Structure formats: C-alpha cells, structure tokens
Image: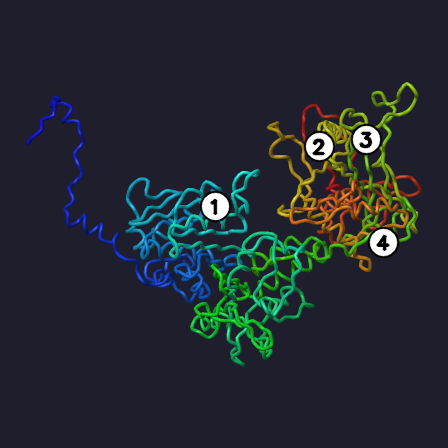
Amino acid sequence: MVMMMDRGIGPLTQIPPLSPWLTPEELLADALPLIDPPSRITVTEAAERSLRVPVQGVWQRYDRTIMPYTVEPQDMSQSRRFKTVCFIGPSQCGKSQMLLSVAAHAVTCAPGPVQLIHMTKTDADAWVEEKLDPAILNSKDLRERLGSGRDDSTFSRKRFKGMRLTIGYPVSTQLSSRTQRMVLLTDYDHMPQQLGPKDSPEGNPHGMALRRITEYMSRGCVFVESTPAFPIDRTIEWAPHPGHPHMLPPVTAGIVNIYNEGTRGRWYWECPDCSQLFEPRFDRLHYDDTLEPAEAGASAEMECPHCGSLIGHRHKVWLNKQALAGRGGWLHESRLLDEAGNRLLVPVDDSTIRRTPTVSYAFNGAAATRVSWEELVTLYETQKRHAALTGDDVEFGNVHYTRIGLPYAGKAIEDDGALSLAQITEERRPLPRRTAPSWTRFITTSIDVQGNRFEVLVMAWGENGERIPVDRFEIAQPPDHAPQAKGDDGRYRAIDPGRYLADADCLLDLPDRAYPVEGTEISLKPCALVLDFNGPAGWADNAERFWRARRKAGQGGLWWLSVGRGGFDKPARVWHETPERGSKGKRARSIKLLNMAVDRLKESVIAALGRFEARINTQHTPDWMEADHIGELLSEYRTPQGYRKKPGVQRNETLDLSVQALAVAEQKGLNRINWEAPPLWAMPLSEANPFALRAAVAIPDAALPDPAPAPRRRRRSYTPRYME
C-alpha cells in the first residue's frame, strides 16, 4: 500500500539526498568481525602483527627483542589467573609502550571496553595527541578498525569496531558506575592515593579500578605501572630476609605496596662465565667511587655475585635477548623454601608460585635498554656527592626513583635522631660574641618577623660554605619616633610591625653594624640583609614600603625580602622573581621576592650542623650561643611532605634564620664562587672589599658609586655589581 504524505511538493524538494545504499553483502562483511571469537594470540604477538612504533623518528614494526623484559608483563594481562598486573621500573624503560600494546590487543584480538587512567587530564590529552593518535595513524589494522563518525575519535574516547577505549584521569567519577574489561593505570604513584571527598574518601585508584572489572570475572584485569615516588616508611621495622628475597621496603603509599602483595618477580641474567642466574642491579655495578663521577661511570661493569666475573656494558643487549630466550628472564617467589631457608624462585607458569591475585614485577634500571651504565653511574655519584656536601638529597632521591626504579628512604630520615642538643653543645667552637673568625669572607644578617619582635641572626661566611653565627638577638622595642612608642607611664610598647610601618625603622642601623675579624684590625659589615616577607597581618604591605624606602636610599641591592615555599618538590632551592599573582585574587606585587624552598634548605642546614670535623658546607656553633637558641636549630623533624615542629616545641626562629642566611648566600652566588678570584664582596680582608672597615673608619672604595640624584621619572634603581 502506497502512503501519500499530506504536504506540498515544495518542502519535499528541500530534503537532502540520501547517502548511497549499502548492499546486504557489504553490511554483513562489515559486521562479521564483531562476532569473531577472541584471537588466541598473546599481546606481544598481536603487537608484532598490528602495531607500529617510532624508532629514532621512523615508524617500524614492533620488535620484542628491543625491550624483552616487557614481554611477560604485558602478556600476563590476558591471564585468567591474576586480576592485577603490577610493573615497577625506571622512566623510559617501556612502561607506557606496554599499555599501548595491551590496548592494541583489545582492539584487534579481544574486543571489549578498556579504560586508561592517566595522572591528570592534561597528561591524558597529551598522551592521546603524542602517542595514541600517531600509533593509530601509522598502524593499518588499528586505523581500519577506528570508527569514522565525528565522535568516534576524541581526546576522551576512541571507538573501534566492537570495542571502545576510554581515556580518563584519577577522579572518583571516572572510576565509578562503569563496567570495563580492562583498566590501565599509568604513572600510578603520581596519582592521588585517595579519591572522593575528603570527609568520605572512596578508596585508592587501584581498589576502585578492581571494582570496575567485576562483571568480566576472570577475563577482567587491572594493569598498573609506575616509577616509585613514595619514600620508605621508617615507622615499619623491615630488613631484607632470604625468606622474601624480592620484597621491597614498605613505603608510605603507592605502587610498591601493590608489588609487595604480588608474586614479586625480578629480571635475571645468566652469567656468561659460570652460567649461574643473577639479577642485574645497580648495586652490582663495579666501579671506583674515588674517581670523578664521569671517570667512575666510564669504568662501570656488572659483577656476577657468584663468580665475580665482570661484564661490560656492550653485552647488556645480548644478555637481555638471551634472558628472553630462556637463559634467565623473570623469576617470581614461590611458596617453597630450600633446606637453608631460602625462598625458591620459579617462572610465572610454575604451580608453586605465590598464591595471590596480583602478578608483580620490579625492574632495575641497570638492565634497561635505553640506559647506559656510564650515564647512570655518573649521575648517581654526582648527586650522591652533592647530597653529602649540601645535605639536600632531593635530586639524589630522584635518581633512585626515576633512573634506578627503587624507593628511597631519604638521608635526613635515615639520620633522624643522630643529631642531638648535647652533641652540638659538646662540639661548640670558642669564639667571642660579635666577633668574626679569621677565615671570614663576608657577613649576612637575617631578620625573622614575629608579631611583637624582630629576631636577628648575624652569620659569618668563609670559603666553600663554612659559616658560624657571630650574633643572635631580638629587637622588641620600637624607635622613639614610632606612633605611640611610649605609654603614659613612660614605658615602651611592644613592637607591632603589622600595624606600624615606623616600627621597622629599628632595623635601619643593622647595615652599619661592623663586626671585628679575629686576629686583624679589620671589621666587616653585612653584604646582604634578608628580611622575612611573611609575618603578622599587615606586615607584607609594610615590608614592601620598607624595602622601597631602602631602595630610594640607595640600599636596594643590600636588602632582600624572603618568602618560604614548602615541600621537597620545588625545582630550585632559591629563586628571585616577581610573584605571578597575588593572594586571594589581589593584584600581584611588582617587587621581586627571594623565594626559598625551605624544606630543601632546612635539610642542608641540619646536615651542615652535623659536620663537626669538616669545614666544607659546615655550620659551626659558637660557645656563646644559648641552649634555647641551639634547641631551636633542632626544633623540627622531617616528614615526606616537609619539615614539621616536634611535639611540644614552640620556637624555631634560629633554624628559620639559618635558612634565610643560606638562601641569600646562595642567591648571591655562594656555590659558584671561584675562591681564587672571588667577587669584591667576598674578597679576602683588604681594601678591595667594599664592606671592610679599618679602625672604625670605612676603607675608601672608588668602585662604590655616588648616590644618584632623585630621578624625575620612575626608573630602575642602580645596583652595584658587588651587590649582585
């Protein structure tokens, strides 16, 4: 029966033409692959068949022999025995490529919903743009299966024939109310370890991901990979034991704890000389650590723990390929012990492997394809010596995390409690108060701002960071010209720097205070004064006005305003720049602030206090310093988030003042000085030093410019080179 529409012929002509018809044969041919059973091939075999990877800028077929240690972990993502695959390794060892291979296998061989969770939304978008999209474009099998609709290829979703790949980031809504066959978690230790509201957290990303694969039962899998990023938990007593030879030290959070709950697999080589299996670890690299870092790195060789044979770096690629062929490879802890009580190690398909739903792998960076032993040892020794010299072991810890692939305890944590008040008191140096030692090159003054006083520390500096306080006092009385300086009873009120700008004028004589140098007729004035920008309410505005007044008086290069930045993740220890934005939405200030990574600097100060026999980067304690002030130096303890006050401790000003002194000294170039040709402000005691005085009369210095006349228009103030 023909149906006639009740409308005019005109509107019908406005309907766009239909797309060409498809024949039933074409429709059936397009749909048939969707009902194919999963291909019985491994992830690695599917990658070799369908995936292209960039090699030195050229897209080539996937080759399992390039990174043979990734074969077993990615293949185990299809195992029905384990619910989680966990892989720990250094950066750039092929961890992200494993996730791409697993996703490609789901596209071409075992269609099903897959979700990949990256660290942040920005990183997820970057991964799609820089890795996933180019891989799809250059891999024919993936490109042909990608949908052609407008919404089939976005930053958050890729629709292929029979499956979808969702790309997200670690928030509770991304890991809730969804059903997935596989969830891939990349860079796990850089994700928040608790998701959901603070008052009612829903769990960690790994636990929430496991709930998403429940419907797929034994076919479901969560793949977790990351470099370790959390420090060793020193509150848990742990020591290596032959009963659990592959166990890593427990950490405060993150992927290492997931690894320890699993099968604990490690990568093994077969020694070419004795044919015994051993794990190629960084601590088995043999080199002379008394040489310069680059020379030590050039001589690094792997030592077999069984026969002592030394294996050159040129054999690493061959040994990795041999391990893939069966002469070594991944060995996991079993449930059995030998007669000596040592845990037996078995391959992953052995029936005696540990009973756990997690198959876990920890890969040492010494065996990584893209890492040279020379580069690794050079970096390790460089940062190790830097940490020993400065006490700042942040970069040394990063070597463990990102280059070796192991958790790090932290030097300050390992030495916690070793430095005591009694020990520092016993090692005090005899020195008259307000007198600098004979080795002094320059002096700095630190001022900490409190609600009712200014705390002041004067520090004398020598070569290579050696230093000692020469005075420590507080200023609690306002100047006479300050508003309401005296009450009706004639007594001075307490200083209130947040309310009265004039109260800061009590600091004006600090640049002119000269300290005699022991054994000479010369006295030194401070070459830098650093003033705390933080303080009571209202002080920040007054501090800015105070500094601008000092600059107008020609002392702009002498005074510094400091602000502390907490945490060990700061990229630099000290930087001098204008704030990018103001607090609470206010406009940013136009003055430069001396930004201090206070936790990194505190680590250096505490380490310097414990170098009693050394002189390089040592902070001596004078015998005149009171016990209360010495106690303030030890008032805080280290946590993974930063330094915190010890329970019951109220005062920590001397530690903060020491941090300010170290910050301004480093900003002026302490670590870059050539002591055979130092800048003028660090010259040996002579007339060339513009801050030196003889017999209480300033030494003439032609290099000092005359005060410039008041400018008619606003312009930058002149800073002499010796003050830079």
Nearer-N-terminus badge (2/3): 3
- Model colouring: rainbow
- Residue depth check, mark 2 versus mark 3: number of the one nearer the observer: 3
In-front residue for pair 587/229: 229
Q: Residues within 10 Å of mark 2 (few under 14, many from 20)?
A: some
Q: Quick one: SS at disc 2?
A: loop
Q: Quick one: SS at disc 1?
A: helix
Picture coordinates of residue 605 (x, y %)? 75, 50
Are the residues at dot 3 and dot 1 in contact (C-beta closer than 8 Å)? no
Residue 241 visible in this rendered orientation of the protein: yes
In-front residue for pair 664/384: 384
Residue occupied by mark 3:
452
Report, in whole angstroms, how far the alpha carbon at label 1 lies from the one at label 2. Answer: 43 Å
- Residue depth check, mark 4 versus mark 3: number of the one nearer the observer: 4
Q: Quadrant of the C terminus?
A: top right
Are the residues at dot 4 and dot 2 in contact (C-beta closer than 8 Å)? no
Residue occupied by mark 2:
717
Q: Residues within 10 Å of mark 4 (few under 14, many from 20)?
A: few
- The residue type indicated by label 3 comes to Asn
Report, in whole angstroms, how far the alpha carbon at label 2 lies from the one at label 3. Answer: 32 Å
- The residue type indicated by label 2 comes to Ser
Are the residues at dot 4 and dot 3 in contact (C-beta closer than 8 Å)? no
Q: Is residue 411 left or right of residue 32?
A: right
- Residue depth check, mark 4 versus mark 1: number of the one nearer the observer: 4
Q: Residues within 10 Å of mark 1 (few under 14, many from 20)?
A: some
**Residue extending furthest top?**
488
Residue occupied by mark 4:
422
Nearer-N-terminus badge (3/1): 1
Report, in whole angstroms, how far the alpha carbon at label 4 lies from the one at label 3. Answer: 31 Å
Residue occupied by mark 1:
123
